[in-house]
């Protein structure tokens, strides 16, 4: 049985990293196993030989002393012991060249400490007491989508959620304020009117800007073929009526329309669901304040795809005096420069309406809501009850009671008195979407459970934990039915449900939510490489980079691959833009496809442009950021934050000698405040230096051949991406442990601490018995004590302490 100790809690100060300098300060030793350290005396001998010379009570190097750790009963000092274990496991040893024990011996020592801690935890497990969990923006949007069959972007209504330890579903930061609750009420009002429909809706304007760095030289996904550029969006029309589409365009800073030198004949098509509703001929003499708009166009209510795209007048290669031609808006001062293919570029699409409302069509959301239609006045109440019962059951994630139905029926009646049957149902939907039972995930201790004791969460609460873990959404009807019957804990049924949920399209949230945040892909939203140094970079490429990594992770999930394939896989997913970026031939069009990789430097996550771009700065690579990323995200050993007043890296000056990044880094870390941390991060980052600031392969930097050599903090020799990947694989237990901790934290929706690490190790051992496949980690997490249980708090908070217990009245 393998022993894998893991710890990913961030180390907050440089002082803790002084443990690196003396953990193994003397000599080498033959390989040993965990049995060699089965006694306190043997563990003390190891500490005395390798650690105590620096980390004693007198010197306390780095503020750490091994005298604070109980080597006989390490469980008594578990929090501090786990930190030391992590350092030992990760190979955080003295700089290369200093003597150290073998890796096997170090692991054996760490394993002996883990074994004692795990034994104690098995006798006294602590599943934790998570804070009250509010649905974050993603969960709220997904739950609404699954409840009402309407997908509404709530980012403009609800504020962004804070992140804790890399995720935005951590209960400790999902706080509640009056302003936030007001936001949920506004969201409920908007969504309910769109979902049910409101013939009295006032005209509004939806605006869709196109970024300057968005490439408009190619076909845009969703727009009709034969067009290029522009934008294509799904817009939810609130009612049947007439709408006006208005467009504006990019201009030169001095005024001329971008595309002026193409002359007359440029046309822009407005289409709804692929059918042309307007064709606008553009005037090359348009000024910045000029716009074009359609006559009123009749459109049905519901989600419709609207495209505003230019008719493609030609295709094929273009040779301009300025290159590359596809990113001409790098400099908007040459709109009418002769010899420049300055095609028109859309700046914004506005949709205004409705006017002359004729009714509400049978939209997907109305079909989801109105499971019955009353034929006569006497049928209204029974039908309303049927609709209320079905919607409330899924919204509240449990069977509804007569009291629930009667309470919501009172809201129906108030709405009905102000209009008709539909207005009554609208009031019910609005009430449910702002109800605390929908917005919060309550977990209530049974009345017979004493404070401070552990208990199993109910089957319905387990169903919610499961669905928000695998789907980032509420449980569906099948899951609620099984849970309400008390059958979800049956091992066979639980496994069946997990497999069903992993196979469902909604499990894509594991890629576009969990992996997106674990791998820090959200940081791609902020990257803006220097357009003159990286002229092929645009927003389309960023989107393709992000999508590649999400699809790559998704393949791990749906093909149930071993998680180490995240580092070693020899395939990826590309579209034409990304294939050209990588130099992969014979890939055309915007559709992503799976391709085999023959260049070992590109294998796995470390060869993907998304990771390499988000760990660079605008005008160059950043070995520091790349080294920190590997340490923090992949190995769970984040370096400390930079000390105050540390000078920034000196950049190349205009007209001065351009120095390669390695040489600038060597000058920078000559300062002692910088040296201690940089010796950990820089060699890792420099091993990736053949990848430039946007992830393209290169062999020279500032005219100098790239030197990717160095040594990792554990002494492993580095000379490029392949060697770095192998160095991580040599400590694959640390990578797997980091992955497990992050997945468990995401599954629980709370921060992991030292009390959870025995459960983490148990999950890892169980997954190892099943080939470390992705599903093995999921099953082990779902069956774990922290996932299935919780501890009764000393004082169980009433729901009213966080939110009202009754639906919000309006």
Image: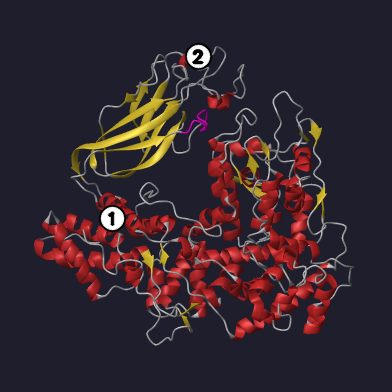
Q: Which mark is residue 407?
A: none
Which of the 4 image quarters holds residue 443?
A: bottom left
Q: Is residue 214 magenta?
A: yes
Seen from the viewer's position, the closer of residues 594 and 498 is 498
Q: Residue at x 37, y 56 (%)?
A: 145
Q: Which residue is mark 2?
A: 336
Badge nearest the viewer, 1 or 2: 2
Q: Which residue is at the front of the view, 647 or 3? A: 647
Q: Is residue 394 left or right of residue 613?
A: left
Answer yes or no: is residue 620 visible. Answer: yes
Q: Which residue is mark 1?
A: 367
* Residue visible at 71% across and 31% down in the picture: 652
Q: Please check the rendered image and state whether residue 472 is part of the magenta-colored stretch, yes or no.
A: no
Looking at the rendered structure, the secondary structure element under dot 1 is helix
| Residue 224 visible in the shown view | no
* Label 1 to label 2: alpha-carbon separation: 52 Å
- 10 Å crowding of disc 1: few (<14), some (14-19), many (20+): some
Figure quadrant of the C terminus: bottom left
Question: 440 and 258: which one is in front?
Answer: 440
Classify residue 462 as left or right of residue 526: left
Residues at circles 1 and 2 in contact by the CB criterion of under 8 Å: no
Where are the magenta residues, as a range? 211-218
- Rendered location of residue 784, percent (x, y): 56, 76
Rate crowding at label 2 as few (under 14), some (14 to 19) or many (20 or more) other CA atoms within 10 Å.
some
Q: Is residue 787 left or right of residue 279?
A: right
Between disc 1 and disc 2, whose residue precedes? 2
Q: What percent of the width, then of the height, locates residue 90?
A: 74, 64
Whether 449 is drawn above or below 393: the answer is below
Q: Quadrant of the N terminus?
A: bottom right
- Residue 283: x, y in percent? 38, 16
């Amino acid at each position: 049985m393998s022993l894998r100790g893991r710890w990913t809690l961030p180390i907050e100060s440089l002082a803790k990293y002084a443990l690196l300098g003396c953990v193994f300060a003397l000599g080498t030793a033959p390989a040993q196993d965990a049995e060699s350290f089965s006694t306190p005396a043997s563990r003390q001998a190891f500490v005395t030989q390798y650690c105590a010379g620096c980390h004693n009570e007198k010197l306390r190097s780095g503020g750490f002393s091994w005298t604070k750790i109980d080597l006989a009963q390490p469980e008594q000092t578990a929090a501090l012991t786990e930190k030391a274990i992590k350092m030992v496991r990760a190979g955080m040893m003295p700089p290369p060249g200093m003597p150290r024990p073998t890796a096997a011996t170090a692991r054996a020592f760490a394993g002996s400490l883990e074994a004692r801690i795990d034994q104690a935890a098995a006798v006294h497990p602590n599943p934790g007491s998570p804070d009250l969990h509010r649905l974050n923006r993603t969960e709220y949007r997904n739950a609404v989508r699954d409840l009402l069959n309407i997908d509404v972007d709530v980012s403009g209504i609800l504020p962004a959620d804070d992140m804790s330890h890399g995720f935005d579903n951590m209960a400790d930061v999902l706080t509640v304020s009056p302003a936030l609750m007001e936001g949920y009420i506004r969201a409920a009002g908007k969504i309910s009117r769109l979902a049910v429909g409101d013939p009295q809706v006032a005209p509004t304007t939806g605006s869709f800007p196109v970024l300057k760095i968005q490439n408009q030289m190619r076909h845009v996904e969703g727009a009709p073929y034969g067009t290029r550029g522009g934008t294509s969006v799904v817009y939810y029309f609130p009612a049947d009526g007439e709408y006006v589409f208005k467009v504006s365009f990019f201009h030169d800073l001095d005024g001329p329309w971008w595309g002026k030198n193409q002359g007359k004949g440029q046309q822009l098509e407005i289409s709804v669901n692929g059918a042309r509703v307007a064709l606008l001929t553009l005037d090359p003499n348009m000024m910045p304040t000029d716009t074009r708009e359609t006559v009123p166009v009749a459109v049905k209510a519901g989600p419709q795809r609207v495209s505003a795209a230019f008719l493609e007048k030609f295709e094929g290669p273009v040779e301009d005096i300025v290159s590359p031609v596809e990113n001409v808006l790098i400099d908007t001062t040459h709109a009418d420069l002769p010899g420049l293919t300055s095609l028109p570029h859309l700046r914004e699409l506005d949709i205004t309406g409705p006017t002359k409302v004729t009714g509400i069509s049978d939209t997907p959301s109305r079909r989801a809501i109105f499971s019955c239609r009353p034929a006569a006045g006497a049928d209204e109440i029974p039908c309303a009850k049927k609709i209320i019962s079905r919607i409330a059951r899924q919204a509240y994630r449990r069977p509804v009671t007569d009291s629930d139905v009667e309470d919501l029926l009172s809201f129906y009646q108030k709405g009905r008195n102000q209009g008709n049957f539909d207005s009554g149902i609208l009031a019910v939907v609005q009430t449910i979407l702002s109800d605390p039972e929908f917005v919060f995930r309550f977990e209530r201790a049974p009345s017979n459970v004493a404070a401070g004791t552990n208990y199993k969460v109910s089957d319905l609460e387990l169903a919610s934990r499961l669905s928000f873990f695998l789907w980032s959404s509420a449980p569906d009807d099948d899951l609620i039915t099984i849970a309400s019957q008390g059958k979800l804990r049956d091992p066979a049924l639980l496994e069946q449900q997990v497999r069903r949920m992993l196979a469902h399209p909604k499990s894509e949230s594991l890629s576009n939510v969990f992996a997106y945040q674990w791998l820090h892909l959200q940081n791609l939203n902020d990257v803006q490489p220097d357009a003159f140094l990286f002229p092929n970079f645009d927003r389309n490429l960023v989107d393709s980079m992000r999508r590649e990594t999400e699809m790559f992770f998704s393949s791990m999930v749906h093909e149930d691959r071993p998680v180490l394939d995240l580092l070693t896989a020899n395939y990826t997913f590309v579209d034409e833009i990304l294939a050209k970026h990588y130099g992969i031939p014979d890939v055309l069009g915007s559709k992503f496809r799976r391709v085999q990789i023959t260049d070992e430097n590109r294998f796995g996550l470390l060869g993907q442009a998304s990771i390499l771009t988000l760990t660079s700065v605008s005008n160059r690579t950043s070995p520091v950021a790349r080294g920190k990323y590997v340490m923090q995200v992949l190995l769970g050993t984040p370096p400390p934050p930079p000390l105050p007043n540390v000078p920034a890296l000196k950049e190349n000056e205009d007209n001065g000698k351009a120095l390669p990044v390695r040489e600038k880094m060597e000058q920078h870390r000559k300062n002692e405040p910088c040296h201690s941390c940089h010796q950990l991060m820089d060699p890792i980052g420099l091993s990736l230096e053949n990848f430039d600031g946007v992830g393209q392969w290169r062999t020279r930097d500032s005219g100098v051949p790239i030197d990717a050599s160095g040594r990792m903090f554990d002494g492993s020799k580095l000379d490029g991406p392949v060697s770095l990947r192998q160095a991580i694989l040599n400590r694959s237990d640390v990578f797997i442990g980091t992955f497990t901790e992050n997945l468990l934290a995401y599954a629980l929706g709370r921060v992991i601490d030292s009390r959870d690490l025995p459960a983490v190790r148990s999950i890892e051992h169980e997954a190892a018995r099943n080939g470390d496949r992705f599903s093995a980690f999921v099953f082990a997490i779902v069956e774990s004590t922290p996932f299935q249980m919780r501890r009764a708090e000393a004082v169980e908070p009433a729901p009213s302490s966080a939110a009202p217990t009754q639906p919000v009245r309006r």
